[in-house]
Amino acid sequence: MKLKKELEEAVAAGKDLTYAKLEGAKLRDAILGGANLNDADLEGANLEGADLNGANLRGANLSGANLRRADLTRAKLNGANLTDADLTRAKLNDADLTDADLTDASLVSANLTDAYLTDANLRGAMLNGAMLSGAKLRGVNLRGVDLRGADLTRAKLEGADLRGAKLEDADLAAVVFDGNTIWPDNFKPPVRHQRRTSRRTSRR
């Protein structure tokens, strides 16, 4: 309890909070930039508007956490549990979400520009209006995901599973995909732009 109170009232930027037990903690607008929260338990915590820029949250339990408007720019969230988390309008630019579980999470209008989401589980997540330009989504489970109005320009979708995903009004310009990418039924994939090899005709 003492640790929770300190975090509510004071700045904890750069502190080592590895394995901290902070389930249900009230951390709204807390300054935790660069903090080490590796394997911390933040289930159901209120982190709305919190500064977690560059924080280490590898393997952390953030299930059901409120992360609305939180700044997670360049945060390390590899293998983190974010099931049912609310990340509406959160900043996740360049964040590493490799192998993270985002099942049923809300990422409405979140900024995931250039984020790393390789092998993450986004099944049932809400990403409508999200910015995913340049995001690495290789092998990601996107089944049933709401991507309406999302910006997916230059996103990497090789091997991604988009069965049942909602893609109305999504921007798929210059998106990268391959033969292992699974699109929704009756969806016409964008035209893949392939580099043309110029051939010079020899003259005699």
Image: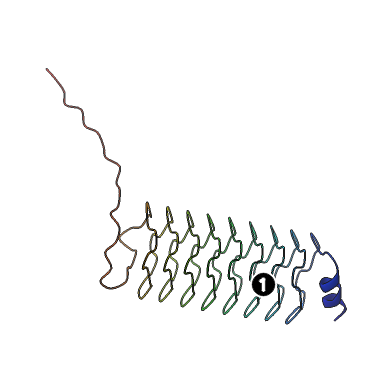
- According to the picture, the residue beneath numbered tag 1 turns out to be 60
**Secondary structure category for the residue under label 1:** loop
Occupied quadrant, residue 102: bottom right
Q: Front-most of 61 and 124?
A: 124
Which quadrant is home to the N terminus? bottom right
> Does residue 102 appear to the left or right of 42 in the view shown?
left
Question: Where does residue 74 sit, x and y in percent of width and height?
Answer: 63, 56
Tell me: residue 181, above or below residue 44: above
Residue at the extreme left of the image, as rendered = 204
Question: Where does residue 29 sit, x and y in percent of width and height?
Answer: 75, 68
Which quadrant is home to the C terminus? top left
Q: Residue at point 81% right, 64% down?
A: 12
Tell me: residue 42, above or below residue 57: below
Q: Residue at point 82% right, 77% down?
A: 4
> Does residue 185 appear to the left or right of 67 in the view shown?
left
Q: Front-most of 112 and 88?
A: 88
Q: Which three-letter amino acid code belongs to the residue tagged 1? A: Ala
Tell me: residue 126, above or below residue 131: below
Q: Residue at point 30% right, 57% down?
A: 190
Occupied quadrant, residue 196: top left
Question: Where does residue 89 sit, x and y in percent of width and height?
Answer: 59, 66
Question: Where does residue 106 sit, x and y in percent of width and height?
Answer: 54, 74
